[in-house]
Amino acid sequence: MQRDLMTGGYKEADCALYTCKEVIAEAGRNLEEHRGFFSRLSWSDEAVRIHLDTAEQGATFLLIYAPGDTDAERAMNVIRRGPFEFVHRYHRFTIEELK
């Protein structure tokens, strides 16, 4: 999928690939460091738990820089061609799940 995005014009820095081990380490650290009241209320912690659970099952993660709606749809056109567990799009104050 990363190769398909790069063929479509993305640079490697704009579609970074992370192993399950990298995500497990980072997600665990994130959950440990952000234990405050507001953190527990937000969907952000739930998203990190989803990332951690999926990584523990051996998933690889692809982070794509898609700042606008057109960019996100362009990336989703590639993503929908293959199997994927979930897509989270991070906005300034919200996290959106794309299908």
Image (tube, helix red, strand yellow):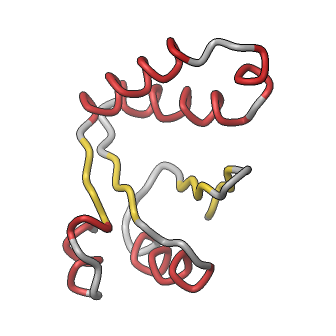
Q: Position of residue 50 (x, y in %)?
A: 55, 32
Q: Position of residue 69 (x, y in %)?
A: 62, 79
- The answer to whether 2 is drawn above or below residue 28 in the figure is below
At x 67%, y 50%, the residue is 95
At x 29%, y 79%, the residue is 10
Quadrant (top left/top right/bottom left/bottom right) for the C terminus: bottom right
Q: Position of residue 78 (x, y in %)?
A: 40, 77
- The answer to whether 94 is drawn above or below residue 15 in the figure is above
Of 31 and 51, nearer the camera is 31
Q: Is residue 26 left or right of residue 98?
A: left
- The answer to whether 61 is drawn above or below residue 67 in the figure is above
Quarter occupied by residue 13: bottom left
Q: Is residue 71 left or right of residue 81?
A: right
Of 57 and 6, nearer the camera is 6
Quarter occupied by residue 45: top right
At x 25%, y 53%, the residue is 17
At x 43%, y 56%, the residue is 84
- The answer to whether 67 is drawn above or below residue 73 in the figure is above
